[in-house]
Image: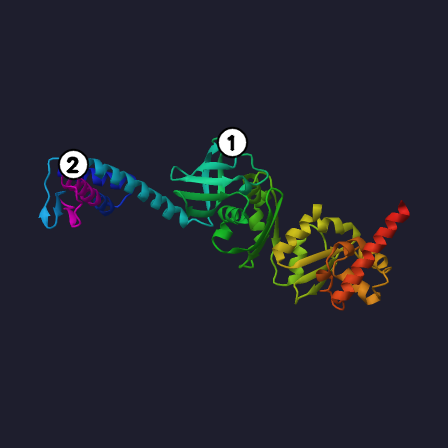
Amino acid sequence: MNKEFLSIIEQLQREKGVNKEVLLDAVKTSLIVAAKKIIKFNTGEEPEDVTAEIDPLTGDMCVQVEGKEFVSGEFGRIAAQTARQVIIQKIREAEKDNVYNDFKDKEGDIISGVVYRIEKKAVIVDIMGRGEGIIPNSFLSPLDNPRMGERMKAYVYEVKRDRGVQIILSRKHEGLVKKLFELEVPEIFESIVEIKSIAREAGERTKIAVFSKEEKVDCVGACVGIRGARVKSIIEELRGEKIDVVRWNDDIKEFIKEALSPATISQIELDRENKRAKVIATPEQLSLAIGKRGQNVRLASKLVGWEIDVRSKESIEAAIKTIGKMKSLGKKGTESVVESGYNSIEAIAKTTEEKLAKIKGISSNKAKQIIEEAKELIENTKNKED
C-alpha cells in the first residue's frame, strides 16, 4: 500500500510537473483534516494539537493527536477521500503556478499558437498545449481575420493571475514587429544590426529605424534581404501591412530626412530646445512627405521623437498672406503664428488661448483678442456669402 502510494506520488510528479514535497505536504494536510473530522464526530470537539508525518522513502504514515498516535477504523476511508480532494486542488494550483512562471518570463517576447476558439470579444489561441493565450479584439490588427486552426505569431503583452492564469497576447503592439525582425534577420539576432526605434499604425504602415555596428554590413539591406525576401516574410505575417526600413543617423536632420522617406526633403529648421522641426518640401514632394491622412509625417515624428511640421514655401507664403489680413497681428506676429503651424484663420479660430499664448510675443490677453478677431472674420465671410 505504501509503495503504491509513493509510486502514485512519483507518477504525478512526472506527469504534472508538481514537486514531490508539495504533494506529500498536501497528503499530510489531508490526514490532519481527516483526523480532526473523525474526532469531532465522535467527541463533539475538534482537537488543536494534530500532526502528521510521511516517510518519503517508505511511504509510512503517522498521525498524532496531542502526542499520541491516532488509529481509527474510519481513518483510511476518510483520509483517502480527503487526500484525493486536497491533492487535486494542489495539482491544479501547481499547474497554474507552472504556467504562470513559464510565461511570466516571456512578457515582451513572441510566441506561436493555433486559433482554437473565436469569441465575441477575443480570440483564444492554444500555445503548444502549454496554455491558452487571449487576444482581445482591440489587440488584433485591422488586417487580421482569424480562422479556426490557423497558426499565428503574437506578442506576449501581459501575464497575470486573475481567476487562474491569463496570457494576454497582441497582434497590434509594435513589439511584434521588432521580434519578427529579430527572428527573420540574423544580423539583428547577433547584435550586428540594432533596431533603434519603431513607429507603427497596425494594419497600415510601420517605420523601423536600424543601425549597423559594422561598416561592412548594410543595415537596411540586411533587414530587407535579397529581393526583399526577409521583409516580405514579415509583411506576410502582418497580413500585408506596409513596412519602411530606414537608416538611423545621430545627425537629427539626416534622420528626419530618412524618416520622411520616400519623400525628398529640401530644407529643415530645428528648434532643439523644444524638439520641433520645420520641414520645407517642394510642392511635388509635399503630399508624399505628409502622406495619406498625415500618416507619413505622423509616423516619422514618432520614429524620431520630434514634432515635425511639413510645409512648402508656397503654402507658408499663402498662410502669411491670409493671416496677415488680421489687424490684431503685425508682420512679426503673423510670421510667428505661421511658423508655429497655423496655416489659416480657421485654424486660429479653432485653437485655444493657452496654446496661442505659448507663441513667443503673444500674451494671454493678446491670444484672446486674436481668436476673437479670427472668429469674427469667419462669421463676416459667411454673412457675405449668404
Q: Quadrant of residue 352?
A: bottom right
Q: Is residue 355 left or right of residue 283?
A: left
| Residue 269: assigned label | none
Find the residue positioned furthest to the bottom: 361
- Circle 1 — which element? loop
Label located before the other in sequence (1 or 2): 2
Q: Which residue is mark 2?
A: 4
Q: Which of 354 and 201 lies nearest the eye of the viewer?
A: 354
Q: Which residue is mark 1?
A: 147
Q: Quadrant of the N terminus?
A: top left
Q: Quadrant of the C terminus?
A: top right
Q: Residue at x 75, y 54 (%)?
A: 350
Image position, residue 365 (x, y; %)? 76, 66
Q: Is residue 267 magenta?
A: no
Task: Quote the CA–CA distance across marks 1 and 2.
Answer: 47 Å
Number of numbered discs present? 2
Image position, residue 378 (x, y; %)? 84, 52
Q: Is residue 261 visible?
A: no
Q: Is residue 202 left or right of residue 383?
A: left
User: Which amino acid does the dot numbered 1 rest on?
Assistant: Arg
Image position, residue 333 (x, y; %)? 80, 65
Q: Nearer the viewer, mark 1 or mark 2?
A: 2
Label 1: how many Cα within 10 Å (few below 14, some 14–19, many 20+): few
- Circle 2 — which element? helix
Q: Which residues are magenta?
A: 28-57
Q: Residue at x 85, y 56 (%)?
A: 322
User: Which amino acid does the dot numbered 2 rest on?
Assistant: Glu
